[in-house]
């Protein structure tokens, strides 16, 4: 018998069951082995809640049902509320041990309802059909007449002008046909899921592409722990499909790959570098890249926030808005780097101040070096669209931008410690002594989450605010300083 027997299968659990019966089994039998929700995931969930609440405003006069964690009681309350014939938010119904809560149920005609599922994404994804189908199956089973099913999602072309206009922020698509196509599978799927949940041991499921689709599985640390801590075959550059084939043939490490396996140019570099435990260096290409740099050098890095609901006028949903930059200026060969930085002090739109400062600091000549520079270029371009007086300057600046990712994405340089990745987080520690270990903020997602928390959140005291800001300064500084170190290392390997 499962440790946590439940007479119901919620929509979330049903979708987990479709992904993998082993994950579902753990949810009911070994919940304690599942990792706790991390801050980044929590931030996404909180954003989903805000998006849902905004969608409710499109249905004035609607009734929000307080959540009762007993599905039977929620269903009882919801059936009573349905008699009001008003839009219902969070109404929950049960049928055949399935339990689903509706974002929005909107009454139509005398006795029917439209079901509206609200998503924070900017497009309709296939997995949403199963989500909506499970709801329709449950509500109809519980006695509701469902006329249409809609997905309401974020319109990424919406540009905020003043107060958010939910009518323009959201797009809606009728997915009734798609839902109806999968409904016949649900009854059998539910029976199979309860059979899996009731097993004494977890179902034996092989790892596969489903582990990452439609989202990375929280059990990956357990199911994937057979891989060696270093050099595993899934580090193969652009080689996930091949890695699965090799896994079938018993290979675990990159160094296990036999000579008869056909590999790409970059993968071949990787395999021989991992075999010899030495970096691959193409001096000619590295020199050619370094020759594109012209003094003064400006090493630039942004941190950005990108909320689903635009925070500022003249911005779109999920647009990257810079709130911080770190800039190191190296005026001439051998000169000491000079540091400049900015971190927005409050919730006012930070773009005008950042554009103004950078226009002064970046001068008229010299290379602007960024890692994965498309991001910095796009961020600046979008900011200048909101503040058109900077458009001319930004388009001239773009021509001066050099991408430090180039030598690593092109495999001019490859160190086995990069583990197949050309990201700064892998390249910097592999090439230099700098590390991201033990940093309070260690990646861009965390930087954005923490900035938004202390800037827009409630009950943040001065001490916490200062502490997060210090961590943000340290993180952005490391990324930028790291770029200088990388350029110096590249120069060094060319001279060796
Ligand atoms: S990691 Fe993969 S195999 Fe393991 S439970 Fe998750 S989806 Fe299933």
Image (cartoon, grey):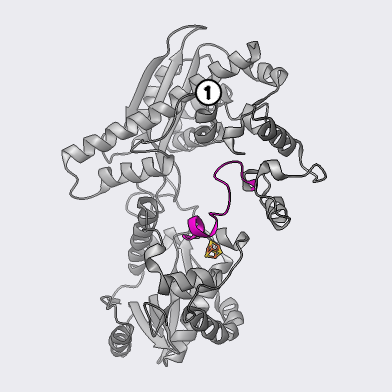
Q: Position of residue 338 (x, y in %)?
A: 39, 14
| Residue that badge 1 annotates | 369
Q: Quadrant of the C terminus?
A: top right
Q: Which residues are magenta?
A: 218-233
Q: Is residue 223 highlighted in magenta?
A: yes
Within 10 angstroms of label 1, few (less than 14), some, or many (20 or more) residues? Answer: many
Observer-nearest of 434 and 180: 434
Q: Write the residue at 36% across / 20% down.
A: 340
Looking at the rendering, in which quadrant would you find the N terminus? bottom left
Question: Is 341 placed left or right of 399 in the picture?
Answer: left
Question: Depth check: 444 or 190 in front?
Answer: 190
198 lies above or below 431: below
Q: Is residue 391 magenta?
A: no
Question: How far across and down, in percent of the image, does residue 374 sit?
Answer: 56, 35
Point 61% across, 33% down: residue: 416
SS assignment for the magenta stretch, majority? loop
Quadrant for ligand 1 reads bottom right
């Amino acid at each position: 018998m499962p440790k946590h027997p439940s007479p119901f299968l919620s929509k979330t659990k049903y979708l987990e069951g479709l992904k993998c019966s082993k994950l579902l089994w753990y949810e009911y039998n070994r919940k304690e082995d599942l990792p706790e929700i991390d801050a980044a995931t929590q931030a996404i969930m909180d954003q989903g809640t805000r998006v849902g609440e905004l969608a409710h405003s499109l249905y004035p006069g609607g009734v929000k049902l307080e959540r009762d964690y007993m599905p039977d009681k929620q269903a009882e309350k919801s059936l009573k509320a349905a008699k009001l014939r008003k839009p219902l938010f969070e109404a929950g119904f049960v049928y055949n041990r399935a339990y689903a809560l509706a974002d929005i149920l909107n009454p139509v005609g005398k006795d029917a309802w439209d079901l509206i599922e609200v998503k924070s994404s900017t497009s309709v994804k296939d997995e949403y059909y199963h989500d909506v189908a499970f709801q329709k199956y449950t509500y109809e089973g519980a006695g509701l007449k469902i006329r249409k099913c809609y997905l309401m999602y974020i319109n990424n072309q919406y540009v905020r002008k003043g107060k958010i206009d939910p009518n323009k922020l959201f797009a809606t698509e009728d997915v009734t046909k798609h839902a109806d196509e999968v409904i016949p599978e649900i009854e059998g799927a539910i029976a199979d899921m309860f059979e899996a949940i009731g097993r004494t041991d977890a179902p034996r499921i092989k790892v596969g592409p489903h582990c990452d689709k439609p989202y990375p599985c929280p059990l990956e640390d357990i199911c994937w722990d057979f891989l060696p801590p270093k050099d595993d075959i899934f580090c193969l550059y652009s080689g996930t499909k091949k890695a699965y084939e090799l896994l079938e043939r018993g290979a675990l490490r990159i160094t296990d790959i036999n000579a008869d396996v056909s590999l790409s140019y970059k993968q071949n570099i990787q395999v021989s570098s991992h075999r010899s435990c030495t970096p691959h260096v193409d001096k000619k290409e590295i020199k050619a890249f370094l020759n594109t740099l012209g003094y003064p050098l400006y090493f630039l890095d942004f941190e950005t926030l990108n909320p689903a609901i635009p925070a500022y006028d003249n911005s779109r949903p999920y647009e990257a808005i810079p709130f911080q930059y770190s800039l190191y200026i190296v005026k001439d060969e051998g000169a000491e780097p000079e540091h400049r930085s900015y971190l927005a002090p409050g919730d006012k739109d930070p773009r005008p101040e950042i554009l103004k400062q950078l226009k002064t600091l970046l001068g008229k000549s010299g290379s602007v070096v960024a890692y994965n520079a498309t991001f910095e270029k796009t961020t600046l371009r979008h900011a200048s669209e909101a503040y058109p007086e900077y458009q001319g300057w930004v388009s001239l600046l773009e021509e001066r931008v050099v991408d430090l990712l180039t030598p690593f994405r092109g495999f001019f340089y490859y160190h086995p410690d990069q583990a197949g990745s050309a990201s700064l987080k892998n390249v910097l520690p592999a090439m230099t002594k700098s590390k991201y270990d033990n940093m309070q903020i260690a990646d861009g997602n965390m930087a954005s989450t923490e900035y938004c928390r202390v800037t827009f959140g409630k009950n943040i005291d001065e001490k916490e605010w200062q502490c997060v800001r210090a961590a943000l300064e340290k993180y952005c500084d490391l990324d930028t300083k790291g770029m200088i170190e990388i350029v110096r290392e590249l120069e060094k390997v060319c001279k060796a």
